[in-house]
Amino acid sequence: MAPERGIDIQTLGVTEIARCARHALALLAAYPLRWLLLIIVFFVVVESLMFIPYIGFVAKMALAGLLGAQMLVLFSGAAAGQPPKPSRLFGVFSLLASAQLVLVLTALVPFIIGLAYLVAQGGGLHSVAYFFGNILTSKPPAPDVFFIFKIILYIAGLPLMFIPAAVVLRGLSGSRAVAEGVRAAVRNWPAALAYIAPAIFLEWLVLELPVFLPRTALAVLAVVAVVILVAWSFSFLYALSAHVFGVAAGRVQPGDPCSFPRRAESSRPDRRRSVE
């Protein structure tokens, strides 16, 4: 049996990355209020899991990985003129279990690496107690340590950033989704750096601004900045992924049974369609 051939992956230069950025801005500008509502729903659903004792942070990261992938689907639809709807945010749960597992692990691996850094600082398991206790009573790491922890999360996630797109835009799953997603990231490391740069800059601002701003003003500014950053990150990641994988706008339609490998599909290959 011949080995499976890899999919075509484009390498983006500075001009293409800039074009993706303009594309991302245009997508956000097309439906600004709808995207704002979607981001609010995303935050409420994901962040509320942190209040679950012991497993809250792990559950939050896992669900964020799933819903974040579905946001790429919604941006794909928006690129084809379909207004995004919050009800479609949960369409990711119709994916095959193997595809969902890839998305969850993609979100958890950087988190695990970040935890390993905290343990290696010399505090042992006590240094990660905040993430496995009750956030209402547990004390978080010191601000400078927490900052480095987050930077490690961003950097560790770079090789994995295109895996969600490989799953939801190209319909891959399992080890092939991982392999093609990592290959895309390696070939497009300048795009990956452009993607995480705003997040790292915001984390630095949050660390430094308490010296200059009152706590209330800083909290309001941080919330607004995070909402804008998350919306931009999803839009930019979609634009980059669509160019890298050569996916046409609207190719993946929320609710379209041909969009993803789904549980209800037969285990036999469909000979009427080409297999990616």
Image (tube, helix red, strand yellow):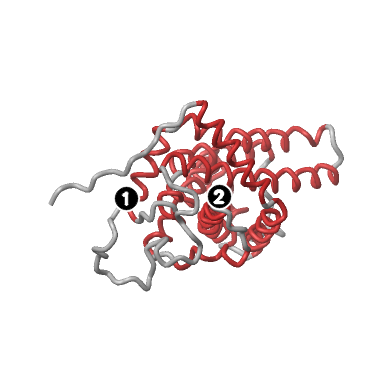
Q: Residues within 10 Å of mark 2 (few under 14, many from 20)?
A: many
Task: Specify the amino acid type for callout 1.
Answer: Arg
Residue in the picture at 84% in, 43% down: 215
Indicate whether 13 appears above or below 185. Answer: above
Q: Which residue is mark 2?
A: 79
Q: CA distance from mark 1 to mark 2?
A: 26 Å
Residue at x 61%, y 58% (from the top left corner): 84
Q: Which residue is mark 1?
A: 176
Horizontal placement of 197 versus 91: left or right? right
Residue 258 lies in what quarter of the image?
A: bottom left
Residue at 59% from the left image edge and 53% from the top image edge: 129
Is 42 or 109 nearer to us in this picture? 42
x and y percentages locating residue 274 in the rendered image: 28, 56
**x and y, in percent, of residue 198 in the image:** 63, 35
Left or right side of 168 for 78:
right
Say which mark, if any, is on residue 52. none
Between residue 20 and residue 117, name the one nearer to us: 20
The residue drawn where x is 29% and y is 60% is 273
Could you tell which of marks 1 and 2 lies nearer the N-terminus?
2
**Front residue of this view, candidates 173 and 124:** 173
User: From this viewpoint, which residue is outermost toward the top?
Assistant: 14
Q: Is residue 106 above or below residue 185?
A: below
Q: Residue furthest front?
A: 81
Nearer mark to the viewer, of 1 and 2:
2
Q: Secondary structure at mark 2?
A: helix
What element does badge 1 sit on? helix
- Amino acid found under the numbered disc labelled 2: Ala
Q: Where residue 72 appears, x then y in whole percent? A: 52, 52
The number of callouts visible is 2
